Image (cartoon, rainbow, N blue to C red):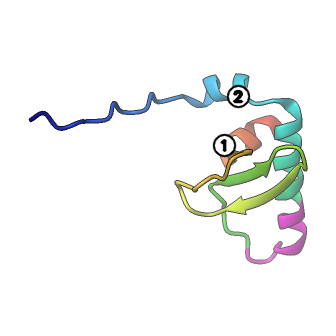
């Protein structure tokens, strides 16, 4: 009996991911991060990224490296947010 072994998911580099993300998704993630900076300016912990709920443009900062996403959510890494800021 042969056991099923799932194929590993392809690795996407940051430059490939940037082209896949819509500008409004980056904008929503950057906005959520900007609010975080305003509120937590004295004790700033670097997030792994922001989970954006598509359609509502709500963002939630995530500090875990592998977030669990619900349907309709997209994860924008901090590196992607940062590269779009400068």
Cα gap from disc 1 to disc 2, whole angstroms: 10 Å
Q: Which residues are magenta?
A: 35-43
The residue under label 2 is 18
Task: Point out residue 85 in the picture as x, y percentages from the top left corner.
Answer: 83, 40
- Up-down relation of residue 29 to residue 39 (above or below): above
Q: Is 18 on the left or on the right of 8, as rendered?
A: right
Quarter of the image for residue 39 reads bottom right
Task: Point out residue 58 in the picture as x, y percentages from the top left corner.
Answer: 86, 55
Q: Element under label 2? A: helix
Dot 1 or dot 2: first in sequence order is: 2
Q: Element under label 1? A: helix
Q: Is 2 on the left or on the right of 16, as rendered?
A: left
One can see residue 60 in this view: yes
* Quadrant location, the N terminus: top left
Give the residue displayed 77% in from the left and 60% down from the top: 60
Task: Point out residue 13 in the picture as x, y percentages from the top left corner.
Answer: 55, 28
One can see residue 86 in this view: no
- Up-down relation of residue 36 to residue 77 (above or below): below
Query: In the image, is residue 68 part of the stretch drawn in magenta?
Result: no
* Quadrant location, the C terminus: top right
Task: Point out residue 22 in the picture as x, y percentages from the top left corner.
Answer: 82, 29
Which residue occupies the foreground of this view, 27 or 54?
Answer: 54
Quarter of the image for residue 82 reads top right
Q: Residue furthest front?
A: 1
Give the residue displayed 43% in from the left and 32% down from the top: 9
Q: Is 79 on the left or on the right of 24, as rendered?
A: left
The residue under label 1 is 79
Give the residue displayed 67% in from the left and 68% down from the top: 45
Give the residue displayed 72% in from the left and 22% down from the top: 19
Query: In the image, is residue 38 part of the stretch drawn in magenta?
Result: yes
Q: Residue furthest bottom?
A: 42
């Amino acid at each position: 009996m042969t056991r099923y072994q799932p194929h590993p998911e392809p690795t996407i580099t940051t430059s490939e991911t940037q082209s896949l993300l819509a500008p409004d998704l980056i904008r929503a993630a950057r906005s959520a991060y900007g609010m975080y900076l305003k509120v937590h300016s004295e004790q700033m912990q670097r997030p792994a990224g922001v989970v954006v709920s598509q359609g509502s443009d709500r963002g939630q900062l995530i500090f875990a490296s592998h977030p669990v996403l619900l349907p309709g959510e997209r994860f924008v890494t901090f590196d992607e947010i940062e590269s779009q800021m400068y």
